[in-house]
Image (cartoon, coloured by chain):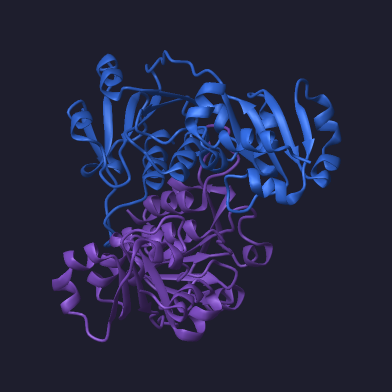
Chain colours: A purple, B blue
Amino acid sequence: MLSKTHTKYIQSLQHKKQRDETGLFIAEGPKVVMDLLSSRKFVCKELLALNGWLEQHTKKIALLKDTTVTPVENFELQKISALSTAHDVIAVFEKREPVNTINTSSKITLVLDTIQDPGNLGTIIRIADWFGIENMVCSIGCADMYNAKVVQSTMGSLGRVNVIYTNLIEWLQQNKKVKIYSASLEGKDVKAFGKLKEGVIIIGNEANGVSDEVMELVDEKITIPKAGEAESLNAAVATGIILSHIKL
Amino acid sequence: MLSKTHTKYIQSLQHKKQRDETGLFIAEGPKVVMDLLSSRKFVCKELLALNGWLEQHTKKIALLKDTTVTPVENFELQKISALSTAHDVIAVFEKREPVNTINTSSKITLVLDTIQDPGNLGTIIRIADWFGIENMVCSIGCADMYNAKVVQSTMGSLGRVNVIYTNLIEWLQQNKKVKIYSASLEGKDVKAFGKLKEGVIIIGNEANGVSDEVMELVDEKITIPKAGEAESLNAAVATGIILSHIKL
């Protein structure tokens, strides 16, 4: 039986402020929890799971040190979940300290300017992991990478990409030695670049694109040509398309 | 004031069965509702909106024939919404009859095998619209294109792509004269195809990919090479990447 205090504590981790203060975050569901446990990139502090799930994973659980394991009933799981339907298990992990000093030479670095949708941010982290991007730089206005929905949509890629949050203008000014590209509705055709060895690629906000202030620091704009009528592409889809053309 | 019966009726359209029986669907929020009204592809039966929104759009509303307009309070809007937060307006539209006989020659046709996530389906319709895909064929197991979350994520592209739901095996057997490609983790590099003038491209389920039965009818598999470690790419992202390489 989950106590009231315990319930409230887990629920409190749905809020960024509480995650920042405690240095903890939540992952939900068998797939994401197992991916994060297997990656060994994050220390697991707590597992709250249905008995069935715990019985299935006794060996794995036996290997965990310093992890509090609490069997819960399904109605308790629903109560502490941030998702509309919780499945089997919720885990509390320690956040990782990002590597704040990024080496941008001889590689592609991804920069996000105010990507606000958690699903988009998680999907972009997963795309970055697919294309072997080591570092991502997020503006302060981006969704929190430890938001439960972001964690969910990274599908286990969370520990494999170094993500920092910083003032973009300052960061870009400090990295002017590397060519700065941005996704844009008007620019050079993405097919014309060939494989790029080095560069910073900026993806802009879902509704407003790259902000004017940031755009002033951009050396070249990349466009995905349109053959139909849609006004724009989803930010994560645009990221995937651009990386597929310049990384492969 | 929204009556109980009216509230229940609008809520009932969140269910596919009810949408099928009435031939109606719901669109939510200023952006999507205005996009669908402006596209003139769908007959609007009802608008339920805050007074502020109605006052802003008096001219547009005056042009609508046979549309019932109901001013609602914010708490009523939240009640009839399928989203976690409703904004300004909810509209009831008539579904469109799809063109069931698709001409597959000299064009790219997109086929979805059990795409279950409504956000993915909506995003794929938007991608299809961007790349000028005229027709999409969905297996019966795909999410319903008139689900509120699908409508939301199409961002206005809903009326511009012809989408049919059918038995994929039968449909593919009837269209064997055109080359059938499928997205796959193991196949020919997407960069090796060049611009394709004609073909059917199959995108598989989020977790399981293209089903074995469908795969038997495939002529060639398309792979997006991986440079990192992620297990897979999101289905909508993969669709965008493949279309960008073979359509542009």
Q: Is residue A190 shown left or right of residue A114?
A: left
Q: Residue furthest left?
A: A59
What x and y, as percent, mark residue A225? 52, 40
Quadrant position of residue A24: bottom left
How many numbered tags mark residues here?
Answer: 0
Quadrant in which the N terminus of chain A is drawn = bottom left
Position of residue A215 relative to residue B37, above or below, is below
> Could you tell me if residue A64 is visible in this image?
yes
Please give the name of the residue rendered at 70% of the width and 30% of the height, measured from the top-left corner.
Answer: B37
Position of residue B155 relative to residue A154, above or below, is above
Q: Is residue B171 shown left or right of residue A151?
A: left
What x and y, as percent, mark residue A135? 40, 71
Q: Nearer the viewer, residue A57 or B199?
A: A57
> Could you tell me if residue A196 is visible in this image?
no
Quadrant position of residue A141: bottom right
Q: Is residue A117 shown left or right of residue B234?
A: right
Q: Nearer the viewer, residue B14 or A111?
A: B14
What x and y, as percent, mark residue A30? 29, 61
Q: Nearer the viewer, residue B76 or B54?
A: B76
Position of residue B173 relative to residue A213, above or below, is above
What x and y, as percent, mark residue A230? 57, 37
